[in-house]
Image (cartoon, rainbow, N blue to C red):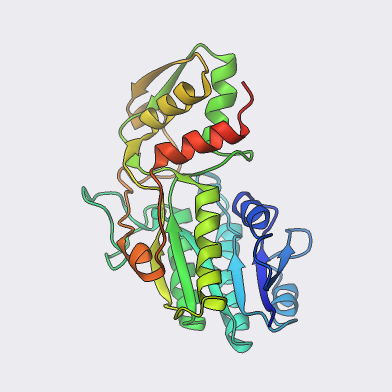
Amino acid sequence: MEYKVLVIAADGQLGRLVRERCEGYKQIDFHFTTIDELDVTNVDVLEKIVKGQSWDFVINCSAYTAVDAAEDNQEICYAINKQAVANLGRFSAEIGAKVIHVSTDYVFDGTSNVPYAEEQEINPVSVYGKSKADGEVLLLENNPQTVIIRTSWLYSELPNNFYQTMVGLGKVRGELNVVFDQIGTPTYGGDLADAILDIVDRVLIMKQDFVPGVYHYSNEGVTSWYDFAIAIFELTGINCLVSPVKSDMFPTKASRPAYSVMDKTKIKQTYQIRIPHWRSSLAKMIDANYKR
């Protein structure tokens, strides 16, 4: 039997990484859509593609992730992160498809000092965080056969993330200031892509029970943006002095959680997901991709 899996936003950072890693799944037929093929805010097109085949899983990698811009562009942010996700839940439920959807640590306010568990109360403090939180609720209401994976500090060898920003700046500047009072855990996008595909494989091929609900996934360990930058330069060999500064040195339109470390016990126990430490994943990615 061949199973069918739809991957939405396969041209985004996470979607591209999922696409790169799915070749070994011979019993699963993956279909990938890009923003040009599927604008998730177009209800008619979304319905046509989601209901166009009998998908076993729909993996949603689409999101509006411009955190500061969201404060001034609330309509499009909510259209992508809330309404489109609600519609995806409704259409996928009508064909009996399971959903894996990616959410964010920004659903929390960052006032904790211990890792956030899935059942803890959310309290987003930005438009982006609120839109993602609303999307979570509506998706689970419309399709209870859903796994929502909250992640944090996503980066990869692909463009437009903290890692690439630091590498680009470090090569042309001798010194950088990076905030040290925001604490969390980097997530290598390739690891998250592997975890998503592992869940799909366990359910479809290994016949493990599908356990819907909210899960947390980031790499293991805890760090600050400052220490993350230090590690990037150490591992790439870039000679750049990094100075720690407080967040108020870089005022932003949207509030950031000061603490966004998440407890990953649930996903590790439920789906037997093995999670590497953030620094080992960073080193592995750099060894594989960085040209000295």
Residue 205 percent location from the top left of the image = 57, 76
Closest to the observer: 158 or 206?
206
Residue 191 percent location from the top left of the image = 50, 51
In the drawing, does residue 124 fall left or right of residue 236?
left
Residue 29 percent location from the top left of the image = 71, 71
Quarter-of-image position of residue 121: bottom left
Total numbered badges shown on the rendered structure: 0
| Residue 277 in the image: above or below residue 56 | above
Residue 129 percent location from the top left of the image = 43, 56
Residue for point 52% across, 64% down? 198
Q: Residue furthest right?
A: 37
Q: Residue furthest top?
A: 174
Q: Residue furthest left?
A: 113
| Residue 43 in the image: above or below residue 14 | below
Residue for point 39% across, 33% down? 225
| Residue 197 in the image: above or below residue 95 | above
Q: Is residue 149 visible?
A: yes
Closest to the observer: 280 or 96?
280
What quarter of the picture does the N terminus occupy? bottom right
In the drawing, does residue 95 fall left or right of residue 66?
right
| Residue 210 in the image: above or below residue 152 | below
What quarter of the picture does the C terminus occupy? top right
Residue for point 62% across, 80% down? 56
In the drawing, does residue 112 fall left or right of residue 93?
left
Q: Is residue 182 visible?
A: no
